[in-house]
Amino acid sequence: MLIAHTTIVFSRYILLEWERRHNQDSRSFGGLFFLFCEEIQDLDYETALRQLMYFCMMLLNCVPTELATAVSRQVMYWIASQPLYIQRLFSNFCTES
């Protein structure tokens, strides 16, 4: 009975707090988030993967050579385990190292 009572009390608290935040808290702007989302262009899968790989390469330039080599090797293993269409996206990465 004590567990059931505590569960009900916390459930009511969560609902009351959600209602308070939704109506009074300045951090919840409701539809404003969705308006900004509409302005952002959706990335296709290929572009997202290329940008992610570019970001990883930029990070590898900032780390010691031994670590960069180890990470590059792991990334190449990951690329090799992916489907062929993903491997083709990163064929120039595999030949650079």
Image: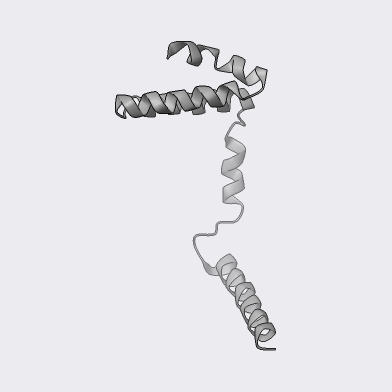
Residue 88 placed where, x, y %?
A: 61, 14
The vertical placement of 48 against 93, above or below, is below
Residue 77 placed where, x, y %?
A: 53, 24
Which residue is the extreme one toward the left? 64
Quadrant that contains the C terminus: top left
Tell me if I can see residue 41 in this picture: yes
| Quarter where residue 29 is shown | bottom right
Give left or right: position of 82 versus 96. right
Q: Nearer the viewer, residue 77 or 46?
A: 77
> At x 61% / y 23%, what residue is drawn?
46
Quadrant that contains the N terminus: bottom right
Tell me if I can see residue 44 in this picture: no
| Quarter where residue 48 is shown | top right
Residue 95 placed where, x, y %?
A: 48, 10
Q: How is the image coloured?
A: one colour
> At x 32% / y 26%, what residue is drawn?
66
Give left or right: position of 39 versus 65. right
Q: How many marks?
A: 0
Which residue is the extreme one toward the bottom? 1
Q: Nearer the viewer, residue 93 or 52?
A: 93
Give left or right: position of 11 versus 95. right
The vertical placement of 89 against 42, above or below, is above
Residue 40 placed where, x, y %?
A: 57, 35
